[in-house]
Image (spheres, grey):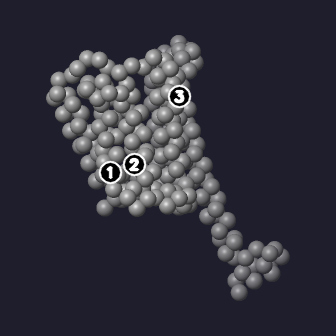
């Protein structure tokens, strides 16, 4: 009856349910726009160093320290946009994750955190790959894609995985090489312990950090 009354008053073939749905649709569009914009901004700013001449020009014009500060500020802004967009994104299924997918998510993400730490601390992992951070991002993204088949997850984790593959290829073209100096075993142990601690912390506070509780 309410829908009929609105149609009569407005003289339009629009029901009340359709009118209520318009703001929701707009909110969904804004949320996805925020997520996609954040991803594009993050990827663009992190691909900037691969454009050697452009980066050199910015450093010369701004100075090394202001350039790094601006880089960090834009990266942080992009991450905020990504977290907000992903947290509010509508659930739009694209595929059904495999039943065994979630069993691999935690160990893949753990390995990703260990590789992330290896990018900042000396260890023999650098003798295996010249790109521990990017390799860690790929494992982190793959682990999440095995457990999530929705549109927002595909954009977020698929986007980070694709960026990492491109960044690795670009670094290899510029002559990136693996470390050759063997490190003492305790550095490897420290990397594993720190990576595991970070993984545990994110696991425990995943709900508060990203709005998706795991327990």
The residue indicated by pointer 3 is: 47
In primary-sequence order, the first of circles 2 and 3 is 3
In primary-sequence order, the first of circles 1 and 2 is 1
The residue that appears at 34% across and 35% down in the rendered structure is 116
Q: Residues within 10 Å of mark 3 (few under 14, many from 20)?
A: some
Q: Give x and y (percent) for residue 78.
A: 50, 39
Give the number of the mark in front: 3 or 1.
1
The residue that appears at 65% across and 68% down in the rendered structure is 21
Give the number of the mark in front: 2 or 3.
2
Q: Give x and y (percent) for residue 5.
A: 75, 83
For the residues labelled 2 and 3, the Cα–Cα distance comes to 23 Å
User: Looking at this view, is 200 or 106 the one in front?
Assistant: 106
Q: Give x and y (percent) for residue 28.
A: 60, 58
The residue that appears at 60% across and 49% down in the rendered structure is 33
Residue extending farthest bottom: 1
Q: Residues within 10 Å of mark 1 (few under 14, many from 20)?
A: some
User: Looking at this view, is 123 or 204 the one in front?
Assistant: 123
Quadrant of res 36? top right
Q: Residues within 10 Å of mark 2 (few under 14, many from 20)?
A: many
User: Looking at this view, is 140 or 120 the one in front?
Assistant: 140
The residue indicated by pointer 1 is: 106
Quarter of the image that includes the C terminus: bottom left
The residue indicated by pointer 2 is: 143
Question: Would you say 71 lies left or right of 190 here?
Answer: right
Q: Disc 1, disc 2: CB below 8 Å?
A: yes
The residue that appears at 20% across and 33% down in the rendered structure is 190
Residue 124 visible: yes
User: Circle 1 — which element?
Assistant: helix
For the residues labelled 1 and 2, the Cα–Cα distance comes to 7 Å
User: Circle 2 — which element?
Assistant: helix
């Amino acid at each position: 009856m309410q829908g009929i009354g609105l149609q009569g008053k407005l003289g339009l073939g629009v029901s009340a349910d359709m009118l209520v749905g318009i703001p929701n649709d707009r909110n969904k569009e804004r949320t996805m726009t925020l997520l996609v914009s954040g991803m594009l901004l993050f990827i663009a700013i992190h691909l900037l160093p691969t454009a050697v001449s452009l980066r050199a020009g910015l450093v010369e014009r701004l100075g090394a320290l202001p350039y790094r500060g601006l880089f960090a500020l834009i990266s942080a802004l992009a991450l905020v946009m990504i977290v907000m967009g992903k947290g509010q994104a509508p659930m739009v299924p694209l595929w059904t994750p495999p039943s065994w997918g979630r069993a691999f998510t935690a160990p893949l993400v753990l390995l990703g955190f260990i590789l992330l730490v290896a990018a900042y601390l000396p260890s023999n992992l650098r003798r295996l790959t010249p790109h521990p951070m990017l390799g860690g991002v790929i494992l982190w993204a793959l682990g999440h894609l095995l457990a999530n088949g929705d549109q927002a997850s595909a954009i977020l984790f698929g986007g980070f995985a694709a960026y990492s593959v491109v960044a690795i290829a670009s670094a290899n073209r510029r002559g990136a090489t693996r470390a050759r100096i063997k490190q003492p075993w305790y550095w490897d142990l420290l990397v594993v312990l720190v990576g595991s601690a970070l993984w545990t912390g994110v696991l425990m506070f995943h709900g508060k950090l990203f709005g998706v509780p795991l327990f």
